[in-house]
């Protein structure tokens, strides 16, 4: 009986500590006021609210073309992505190389690659969701996609 009481007390203490842990969304200063942190135009962080950034310079011409990322080696084989960019936006993405040697590779990548291609086009960046069950392919795809986007200067 005594062990049960100790276990319950420890669990409750742990939960209280867990839920009282400050998060980045709930930052306060020692005075109890919200913390203000800003970024200056030069990109340095300040301890006070930042001054507004100056007006943006003329934007460079939008990039267009087809760019192929570097081949990223995974435990099951290389993954390489090619993107088509029109006016600075990804309009098409396809994996030009991916593991397909075995039946399981074909099954996993037959499902994962179309999802990753669709995510890349809709996000127009390498900040896409991984596909469950295709972790290695997803990691390789994201890294190769970032390489292609770097070439496109996106």
Image (cartoon, rainbow, N blue to C red):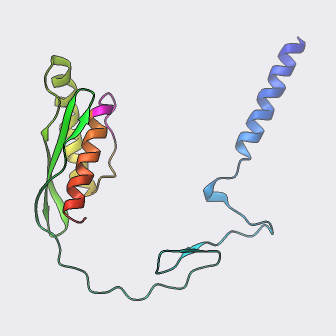
Residue name at image x 72 percent, y 64 percent: 28
* Whole-percent x, y for residue 83 in the image: 15, 53
Residue at the limit of the structure toward the right, as seen here: 2
Residue name at image x 61 percent, y 58 percent: 25
**Disc count in the image?**
0
- Image quadrant for the N terminus? top right
Residue name at image x 61 percent, y 72 percent: 37
Residue 147 is a magenta residue: no
Magenta stretch, overall SS: loop
| Up-down relation of residue 127 to residue 86 (above or below) | above
Please report the bounds of the magenta region as a residue range. Answer: 130-136
Quadrant of the rendered image containing residue 112: top left
Quadrant of the rendered image containing residue 29: bottom right
* Whole-percent x, y for residue 61 in the image: 17, 78
Quadrant of the rendered image containing residue 78: top left
Residue 133 is a magenta residue: yes
| Up-down relation of residue 54 to residue 7 (above or below) | below
């Amino acid at each position: 009986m005594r062990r049960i009481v100790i276990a319950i007390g420890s669990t409750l203490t742990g939960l209280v500590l867990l839920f009282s842990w400050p998060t980045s969304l709930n930052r306060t200063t020692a005075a109890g006021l919200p913390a203000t942190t800003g970024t200056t135009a030069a990109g340095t962080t300040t301890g006070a609210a930042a001054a507004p950034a100056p007006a943006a310079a003329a934007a460079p011409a939008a990039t267009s073309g087809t760019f192929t990322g570097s081949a990223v080696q995974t435990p099951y084989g290389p993954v390489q992505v090619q993107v088509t960019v029109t006016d600075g936006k990804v309009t098409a993405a396809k994996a030009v190389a991916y593991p397909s040697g075995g039946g399981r590779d074909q099954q996993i990548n037959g499902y994962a690659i179309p999802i990753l291609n669709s995510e890349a086009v809709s996000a127009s960046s390498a900040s896409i969701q991984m596909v469950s069950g295709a972790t290695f392919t997803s990691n390789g795809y994201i890294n190769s996609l970032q390489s292609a986007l770097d070439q496109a200067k996106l």
